[in-house]
Image (spheres, helix red, strand yellow):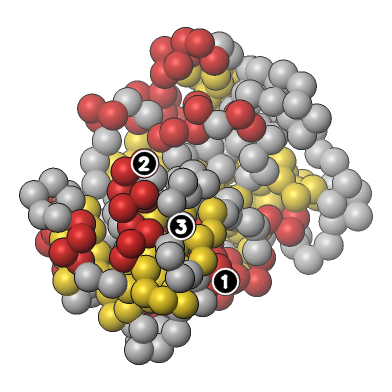
Amino acid sequence: MQAVTVRDREAGLAGLALADLPYPHMAENDVVVRVHAAGFTPGELDWPATWTDRAGRDRTPSVPGHEFSGVVEELGFGTTGVSVGQRVFGMADWTRNGSLAEYVAVEARNIAPLPADIDHTLAAALPISGLTAWQGLFDHGRLGTGQTVLIHGAGGGVGSIAVQLAREAGARVIGTGRSADRDRALALGVDTFLDLGTEKLEDAGQADVVFDVIGGDILDRSAALVRAGGTLVTIAMPPNVRPEDGRAVFFVVEPDRARLADLVRRVRDGRIKPVVGSVRPLAEAPAAFTPATRTPGKAIIRVTEG
């Protein structure tokens, strides 16, 4: 099969290339999915799991990408709940070859059925961003109706879905980002937008939940914005500064089949919409990682037509 691979950690983006790889090996309770569309996170080459398996052993050449939509090609021993030929979408395991390939092997618990009227390109933009937004806001942040949430990166892949989910939950939403994100964030429903390039973060005021996707100085300064009893949630890095009278949570998104099914129902009903950016063929996936080529929204790789 054709796949995008990374062979040399030191080479960085220059080490990405399209190559021929063997058909993926299935373990017990796995499925093999013929990938129609795939998503990736630009920083994946910095993740330890991109280069090693669960035991810490080198697994290069590795296939990046951890979001996908496609059709079930084959079932592993003991796999239940899905069938060959079924449209599905979901997450690839962190420490196994990913979705920038014609086929990907994943645990069946990582995928959910995809309705026939949802395009593969749109579905591939949903799994990680949607689950991260939900888990950050509600599982970890405990956001409730009438509360205020401050969402950093409100125009990005995770942030845009978080804004929509928070609005649906009846929260007041403060969004942050760069000037180019303002119109998009306002259209998604933020009540207030703060430009991190020209305005003071401290002017955002306090919030019951601060949801960070940026890290660094922004994360450190965000601790002071958390109301008493509130929560600072981040996916960027463990926080160095904690709220004086609140919680701080760093988390890595987890697969959740039931939540994926719930999220795709919201997409189908028009309650949320993933923000899709550029769409490229598999051969152009290495170039899509380059910062200069990125466009607003989630970059999607179209692997198989149809």
> Who's the residue at 42% across and 18% down the image?
13
Residue position for label 1 = 139
The quadrant of the image that shows the N terminus is: top right
Mark 3 residue element: loop
Amino acid at dot 2: Gly
* Mark 2 vs 3, N-terminal side: 2
Q: Residue furthest front?
A: 244
Question: Which residue is more in the foreground, 29 or 204?
Answer: 204
> Who's the residue at 57% across and 71% down the image?
139
Q: Quick check: 179 left or right of 296?
A: left
Whether pointer 2 and pointer 3 mark residues with C-beta atoms closer than 8 Å, the reply is no
C-alpha distance separating marks 2 and 1:
23 Å
Question: Which residue is more in the foreground, 233 or 65?
Answer: 233
- Position of 86 relative to 106 (above/below): below
Q: Residue furthest right?
A: 78
Mark 2 residue element: helix
Which of discs 2 and 3 lies nearer the camera? The answer is 3
Residue position for label 3 = 242
Amino acid at dot 3: Arg
> Who's the residue at 45% across and 16% down the image?
12
Question: Which residue is more in the foreground, 212 or 206?
Answer: 206
Q: Where is residue 205 drawn, in percent x and y?
A: 22, 70
Which of discs 2 and 1 lies nearer the camera? The answer is 2
- Position of 85 relative to 105 (above/below): below
Residue position for label 2 = 216
Q: Quick check: 226 left or right of 173?
A: right
* Mark 2 vs 1, N-terminal side: 1
Q: Where is residue 304 drawn, in percent x and y?
A: 50, 40
Q: How many marks?
A: 3
Q: Where is residue 53 drawn, in percent x and y?
A: 74, 29
Q: Quadrant of residue 94?
A: top right
Q: Where is residue 196 drawn, in percent x and y?
A: 17, 51
